Amino acid sequence: MTIDPDVLAAIAGMSVATYVCRAGGFWAMGLVPLTPRVTIWLESIPIAVLSAILAPAVAQASPPEVAGFAAAFLAMRVSGNDFVGAISGVAAVGVARSVLGSGP
Amino acid sequence: MSGGGVPFTVAGLRAGAAGVAALAASVFAYGIAFGVLADQHGLDMMTTLLMSGTVYAGSAQIVALQVWTTPVPLLAVWVSTLAINARYLLMSAALRPWFGRLDRLSAYGSLFVMADGNWALAMRECAAGRTDAAYLLGGGLIMYASWVTATALGHGLGQFISAPRRFGLDFMLAAFCTTMAVTMWRGRTDVWPMAAAAVVALASEHFFPGYWHILIGALLGSAVGAWRHDHRP
């Protein structure tokens, strides 16, 4: 079994591009002194990433997904456990889609 | 294998693997979906596995399939991959104060399997004072194995497997981000970076399709966090 050279080049380029992104930020921050200000900035990244992922998803949520966000939020507040929280959210979406019939 | 006071242990590896259990289920479902699509786009099993095993980036791989023709438009495939994964630049930057104290092999090896889910879990783990850096790799290896296995399964017998959407599995990452935002919330310091990230993400999503909103929103949101800190009395 052989793979076309252009297919191989496409995949090799994709894997290099992806790893450059995965390692690049870490590498670049090694060239900058980690002053308190830079550290505060880096520490603000996780909550900002979560917020940037969630904002459009919440803004465009269909009714089953609204139920999913609510279920995940409440289950997390009550249980304090990610697994319970995430599974509750997914289950709520699955059930709501089958009830409301907005699935595929 | 530890350097500069940051542990990198088997216990950390195990904790990371346990942490991603639910996420791995959704990665598996997503991997099956990719395998089915790859088959439909005429990629053979070997090519599909090579892509999943070396690229390991679900969204980028699915988008690459959308432009996949013969011959492959190399520039379009590469540029779209870079654009979709640009958010990883910011995520790996955030690992610097922690992973910078590891040896190079552990740090750069772990980064190969850094994805949204295990990264967010690891950042929270570190913020909670549990600094075993093998946590990221432990979660990443489980998710990587799920991705590659599911890709093969989807390619082989995809047409017999029902859509993951029916069970709400496509909602897993959103659900996880919600639960993590609940526990990573540090109080009033987070109001401004979070609000800025949300507003900027919504605005940029309107103008730039794809995944740019994550990078742009997070960049400005975290900058607001640092700026607020500087101007605190």
Image (cartoon, rainbow, N blue to C red):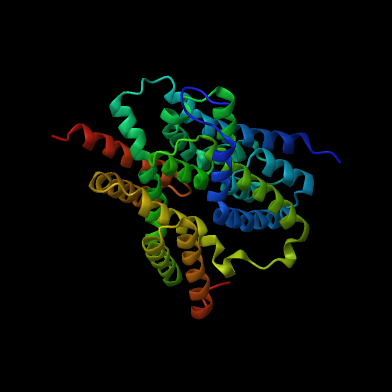
Count of number-bearing discs = 0
Q: Is residue B174 left or right of residue A39?
A: right
Q: Nearer the viewer, residue B70 or B121?
A: B121
Give the residue furthest to the front. B11
Q: Is residue A98 above or below residue B57?
A: below
Would you place residue B63 above or below residue B168 in this image? above
Figure quadrant of the C terminus of chain B: top left
Report the residue at 42% width, 38% height from top.
Answer: B126
| Corner quadrant of residue B75 | top right
Q: Is residue B88 left or right of residue B138?
A: left
Q: Residue B166, percent across and down?
A: 58, 70
Position of A90 with respect to B141 (left or right) is left
Residue at x 58%, y 57% (from the top left corner): B26
Q: Is residue B103 left or right of residue B120?
A: right
Q: How far from the left and from the top, in percent, is residue B80? A: 55, 41
Nearer to us in this view, B161 or B13: B13
Can residue A60 be seen by looking at this rendering?
no
Please tell me which residue is depicted at 65% across the width and 50% down the height of the picture. Answer: B146
Q: Along the line of sight, which residue is nearer the eye, B19 or A42?
A: B19
Q: Quadrant of the N terminus of chain B?
A: top right
Determine the residue located farthest toward the left in the rendered image: B233
Query: Measured from the top left, where is residue B125 in percent x and y?
Result: 44, 42
Of the pair B185 and B206, the residue shown nearer to us = B185
Q: Is residue A80 visible?
A: yes
